[in-house]
Image (cartoon, helix red, strand yellow):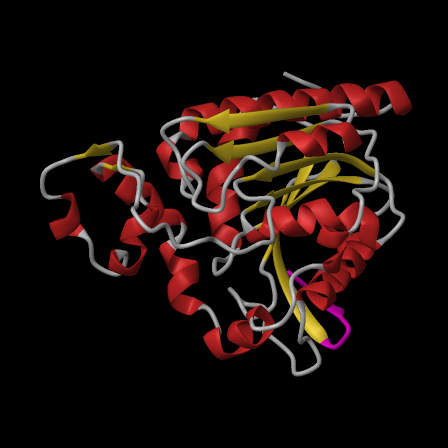
Amino acid sequence: MHITVRSIDVHYQEVVAGVPVISLHGWPAEHGQMLAMMEPLFARRQGWRRIYVDLPGMGKTPGADWLTSHDLMLKLIAEFIEPVAGERAALVGHSYGAQLVRGAPAARHWPICGCAAAVAWGDGRVAAAARPVVLAEEPGFVAALRMEKPFLDLFVVRTMPVLDIVRAQAMPGVLAAGYNFLSRIDAGPSFSYLSEVPRPFPGPELICSGRQEPGGYQHLPALLQSYPRSTCAILDRAGHLLFAEQPRLFQALTSEWLYRAEEYLDADTSNGPEQT
């Protein structure tokens, strides 16, 4: 499916009906990354309409000459949400998508019933570690790398199951991205909202990061003051590839966040999602 926002045909995949939960992927990636991360959570959960978006310059959504900054990317996503989601939605994002999730409530006054952000909530960039942290490594892991070799330093847990997840979920988007377009945006300033005091968000929140995240996690607890219904989880044995290195913990935390979002909706409406 697609919808035109400011001359860009934004591609997205939609699954069933209900309250929208909009998933925003990392950089570079595509909607299949979030679909693989999130869909297992809905095997026994009803009432959610899942929307998986390809951000501009990634997946099947083209870039545009006028889109020249992270702030414009955020504005485009905010304008995508309203016509697609209707009255209210939950947002979830990974890495760069987490930056968009954090900025979305500030970008437009719009009813959001819950936000979840996985990995970094700093300035949106992954720092290159001077000495990569490696907590576990199987023999032959490095030799098995193919297209993943440039990302070796991001692996905190170097096992074949982790590599299989990264290979299946992350690499399709890495290979298909429009790097000329993305590099033009990345060369500019970061999100302007990062220099502002966070706008309070009353709904259920999940902030999730790896303890070995190269971009750091120390700034995250300070955000709790602006999010009174937030859970902040810093997971050991995980870095920027948290979704692959701690998949069961990530799914448990995200499932609990969805439960809180359902409860929040039920308290506010008479037809919130139902748990089965």
Residue 222, percent across and down? 68, 32
Q: Nearer the viewer, residue 52 or 106?
A: 106
The residue lying at 48 percent from left, 51 percent from top is 32
Residue 264 visible (yes or no): yes
Question: Which residue, as the protein is rendered here, is positioned at the far front?
Answer: 130
Q: Is residue 128 left or right of residue 74?
A: left
Residue 63, percent across and down? 60, 75
Q: Quadrant of residue 56?
A: bottom right
Residue 102, percent across and down? 70, 45
The residue lying at 77 percent from left, 73 percent from top is 6
Residue 85 visible (yes or no): no
**Residue extent of the magenta highlight:** 1-7
Q: Is residue 156 left or right of residue 76?
A: left
Residue 41, percent across and down? 54, 28
Look at the picture and state if 149 lies above or below 219. Answer: below
Look at the picture and state if 63 lies above or below 274. Answer: below
Look at the picture and state if 2 lies above or below 220. Answer: below
The quadrant in which the N terminus is found is bottom right
Q: How many marks?
A: 0
Q: Nearer the viewer, residue 104 or 90?
A: 104
The residue lying at 89 percent from left, 24 percent from top is 268
Q: Nearer the viewer, residue 196 or 203?
A: 196
The quadrant in which the C terminus is found is top right
Look at the picture and state if 20 lies above or below 273. Answer: below
The residue lying at 54 percent from left, 48 percent from top is 95
Question: Which residue, as the protein is rendered here, is positioned at the far top?
Answer: 276
| Residue 231 within the segment the image draws in magenta | no
Q: Quadrant of residue 157?
A: top left
